[in-house]
Image (cartoon, helix red, strand yellow):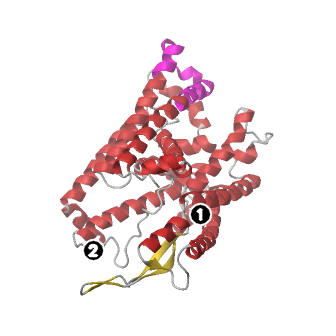
């Protein structure tokens, strides 16, 4: 406890870090206040059907990312998710299209162009998603729309307001990244997820309390399992395979350079949460062909019900496949080999050039397989926990995308705070060891805006 208090005092004593933290908290407060502002022309007392429809599947995931704003018909109903979608698309295009990749390598000017294109694409994506949201709102809670706001007026005003709201949230994220602490877009998503944790926690406690002493004992066991799963995901996120690298000695005048032995860290979970997000997006597509009818008699339940064994099998296999695909896209062993060669570095026992490329690729494939399996297990774990009697809301925090994002963002933010402490010659956040940085991977693909 004394160590914690001392660390907090050290953090507060650094003026720059203190200003960054206060600035970040203020912007996050503005975001949370805006999440409760209902769209004009909507009666918030008649949104029960909308809330019920946004509790599972991809809509439930989106609703958790925006802190419940989706089910409350808020001006921030889509949150920062259109920006994340546009950023993912731009990251993939940057990797696949050489011309855009060349622009990105132009330095700060090239990155500004990519960021500007991402903003334009965000507007387009938001307009289409806002129109779809209006259709979904009318189909589930059409009676919530006030009579004077029907027709084209409601459609136009809602699209404009939701688009403006998303762009404002995107601006908040960029400001947090520039002047605050951590990655703005990622922190906004994490805050949205955490906003639903107390309610889910209270619902689970109330459900177990009705069973008396046995229920409270089960609740205690559930909390212990939740902590264990969180610790396991921390190990998964920070796990690396260290490949030894030696650097040739160079003598310039009377001084010797190089000759040091370092390590090339290959992440076990290089894909981050992207494989799970891709898998969930693909799983959601079949429901569009059956008009969101996902009852017991519909085959679509195999793609929407996380407690279904067929869903778990398909989702797990797709997560493993997407882990390898996404890792292959963002990980370039050829570039690593060339960088080592240019810096006079080499892997002991491996020839420079193509042999080094093949060696790094082989090692990465070997560490990706267990990482992919663990990510798949984390993805289906909420469904397993729900089958064991945990309420649906609380079960979503036992793994899956929500917990992975929270763990990754918290570790990334703590690493930045520790960097500030070490630069001022203070102790780090831990008595032994230091936080491992996550800058090598910007999943889910938000360079300059919000990687997880």
Q: Is residue 73 shown left or right of residue 434?
A: right
Say which label, 1 or 2, has the lower sequence index.
Answer: 1
Asked whether residue 261 is in view, the answer is yes
Furthest toward the front, the residue is 253
Residue at x 71% of width, y 38% of height: 287
Furthest toward the top, the residue is 148
Magenta highlight on residue 393: no
Q: Is residue 76 shown left or right of residue 327?
A: left
The answer to which quarter of the image holds residue 27 is top left
Foreground residue among 223 and 281: 281
Residue at x 31% of width, y 72% of height: 428
Furthest toward the right, the residue is 297
Q: CB atoms at circles 1 and 2 under 8 Å apart?
A: no
Q: Is residue 419 shown left or right of residue 282?
A: left
Quadrant into which the N terminus falls: bottom left
**Residue for badge 1:** 218
Q: Which residues are magenta?
A: 129-157
Residue 99 got which mark? Answer: none
Question: Where residue 408 sits: x, y (%)?
Answer: 47, 60
Could you say whether the residue bearing mark 1 is in a helix, strand or loop? helix
Foreground residue among 273 and 200: 273
**Residue for badge 2:** 427
Q: Quick check: 257 above or below 72? A: below
Q: Quick check: 124 above or below 416? A: above
């Amino acid at each position: 406890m004394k160590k914690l208090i001392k660390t907090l005092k050290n953090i507060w004593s650094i003026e720059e870090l203190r200003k960054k933290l206060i600035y970040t908290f203020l912007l996050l407060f503005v975001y949370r206040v805006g999440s409760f502002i209902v769209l004009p022309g909507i009666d918030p007392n008649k949104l029960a059907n909308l809330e019920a429809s946004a509790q599972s599947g991809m809509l439930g995931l989106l609703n958790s990312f925006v802190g419940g704003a989706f089910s409350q018909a808020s001006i921030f109903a889509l949150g920062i998710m259109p920006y994340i979608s546009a950023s993912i698309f731009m990251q993939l295009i940057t990797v696949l299209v050489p011309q855009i990749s060349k622009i990105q390598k132009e330095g700060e000017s090239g990155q500004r162009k990519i960021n500007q294109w991402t903003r334009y694409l965000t507007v387009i994506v938001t307009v289409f998603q806002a129109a779809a949201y209006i259709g979904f709102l009318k189909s589930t809670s059409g009676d919530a729309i006030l009579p004077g706001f029907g027709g084209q007026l409601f459609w136009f005003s809602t699209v404009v307001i939701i688009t403006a709201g998303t762009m404002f949230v995107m601006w908040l994220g960029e400001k947090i990244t520039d002047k605050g602490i951590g990655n703005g877009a990622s922190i906004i998503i994490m805050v949205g997820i955490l906003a639903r944790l107390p309610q889910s926690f209270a619902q689970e406690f109330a459900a177990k309390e009705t069973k008396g002493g046995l229920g409270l004992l089960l609740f205690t066991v559930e909390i212990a399992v939740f902590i264990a799963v969180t610790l396991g995901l921390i190990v998964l996120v920070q796990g690396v395979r260290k490949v030894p690298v030696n650097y040739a000695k160079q003598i310039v005048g009377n001084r010797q350079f190089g000759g040091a032995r370092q390590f090339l860290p290959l992440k076990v979970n290089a894909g981050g949460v992207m494989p799970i997000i891709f898998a969930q997006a693909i799983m959601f597509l079949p429901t569009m062909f059956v008009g969101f009818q996902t009852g017991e008699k519909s085959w679509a339940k195999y793609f929407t019900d996380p407690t279904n064994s067929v869903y778990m099998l398909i989702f797990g296999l797709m997560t493993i496949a997407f882990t390898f695909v996404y890792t292959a896209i963002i990980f370039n062993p050829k570039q690593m080999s060339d960088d080592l060669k240019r810096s006079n570095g080499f892997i002991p026992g491996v020839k420079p050039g193509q042999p080094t490329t093949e060696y790094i690729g082989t090692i990465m494939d070997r560490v990706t397989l267990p990482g992919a399996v663990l990510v798949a297990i984390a993805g289906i774990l909420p469904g397993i926990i729900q089958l064991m009697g945990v309420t649906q809301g609380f079960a979503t925090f036992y793994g899956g995308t929500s917990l992975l994002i929270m763990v990754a963002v918290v570790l990334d933010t703590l690493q930045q705070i520790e960097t500030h402490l070490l630069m001022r010659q203070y102790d780090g956040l831990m008595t032994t060891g230091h936080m491992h940085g996550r800058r090598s991977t910007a999943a889910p693909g938000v360079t300059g805006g919000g990687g997880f």
